[in-house]
Image (cartoon, helix red, strand yellow):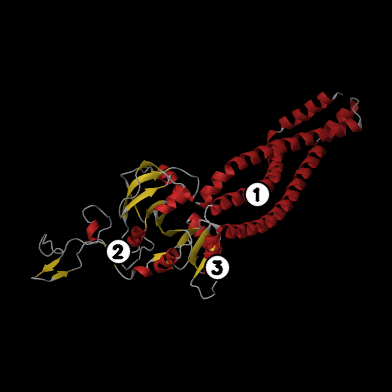
Amino acid sequence: MNPGGIAFLSWKHLSHRPMRSLTLVTTIALTLFFPRALQVFISESEDVLQERARSTPLLVGPKGSSIDLTLNSLYFTPQQLPPLTYAAYENLSRQRFGTTIPVHSRFRAEEAPVIGTSLAYFELRELMVVSGRMITRLGDCVIGAQLAARKNLKPGDTITSSPENVFDLAGVYPLRMRITGVLAPNHTADDDAVFVDLKTTWIIEGLAHGHQDLTDPGPPGESGESGKNVVRANASVIEFNEVTDENITSFHFHGEPGAYPLSSAIVVPRNQKQHALALAAYQDKDATAQMVIPLSAVTDLADTLFATQRLALAAFRLLGVAALGLASLVFLLSFRLREREMLTYAKIGASRILVGTLKAVEVTIVVISAMILARVAVSLTRSLASDLLSRFLN
């Protein structure tokens, strides 16, 4: 019997039982795919994290976990971190270590992070407005391309901040923000964020608010009572939850500005000297803030991921051994059930070597098919990994 005939008989037997053959191919393919896919995701995640970290030279934030601070400042992931005071940010700016950019990323609007910052942030991230215009006043915002597409938002629409606690007794109302522009996509966390002026985040936090004009008589007894030089307000005074051209002058801040909160500050030194001086300034053990090199923090995170990868690969290998053992058992039982068929081959003149070759070719077809399927799946995973990781991290 020629090799073509052996391959034909093996293929006909596999196609005669398609469900069994498909199950074997899929099982072996998944056994080969999972370890390789994990390696692809770990490698891609390191590249994605390091790419954004490299564009952020230094971070200043409250003392604590450098990884939490980095993820909060770069990817806007919610973290339970104490605030960095605005006074600390101003002190940092006066030291002239380079461009200093404030970041306040505590709040959310329809599940998207609300980022209070300055125009220097857009220059650092090379973010351009492709539709509409940039922020011009309190209560304005520009949004990322992915958020605009997902929520079908455009300039002129509004988006409302989400309350941190529905049982907030302080009476801080959600702020409805006017969308003035949509940013060009850059395939980072910026694509799913809402960017506002720093003071707008303080309005959301309840540190500033506006009131209707109490000297305006309006309907009797609605907002208060006015005498000669005295205005008495009652509980019906309306606190605005939207900044408009009409009420913007009524918004005012309370408390000491130096105590206002930030999440962190990005420092972009202009040269190596400024970089070294900035790091040296935060080496004091008594300092209330810390300076972090994001790339170092991301590298530490990657080392943790690699340690997890080794454990996961060991688990996948054990599962692979079990899966291959089950596949071998299926083949052996199949060959046992086909003893009469093999006996027929022997009666028509097939040798034991030929019968063994027939079985080996059948196993080879299944294994090669599984390898091809696994390779295709890995290639597809590699092409989608960067986008999937960006979505996950965002």
Q: Where is residue 108 in the image (x, y as percent from the top left)?
A: 40, 56
Q: What element carries label 3?
A: helix
* Amino acid of disc 1: Leu
Identify which residue is drawn at 38% across, 63% down.
165
CA distance for labels 3 and 1: 39 Å
Q: What element carries label 2?
A: strand
Q: Is mark 1 on a helix, strand or loop?
A: helix
* Amino acid of disc 3: Ala
* Amino acid of disc 2: Ala
Q: Which of 358 and 230 is in front in this view?
A: 230
On the rendered image, what quadrant is the N terminus found in?
Answer: top right
User: Is 214 drawn above or below residue 369 in the view shown?
Assistant: below
Q: Residue 38, which numbered label?
A: 1
Dot 1 alpha-carbon crowd within 10 angstroms: few under 14, some 14 to 19, many 20 or more: some
Dot 3 alpha-carbon crowd within 10 angstroms: few under 14, some 14 to 19, many 20 or more: few
Residue 363: name its quadrant.
Answer: top right
In the rendered structure, the answer to whether residue 261 lies left or right of residue 386 reads left
The answer to the question of whether label 2 and label 1 lie on touching residues, with beta carbons closer than 8 A, is no
Residue 337: name its quadrant.
Answer: top right
Which residue is the site of mark 2? 208
Which residue is the site of mark 3? 280
Disc on the earlier residue, 3 or 1: 1
Identify which residue is drawn at 91% across, 25% down.
349
Identify which residue is drawn at 12% across, 71% down.
230
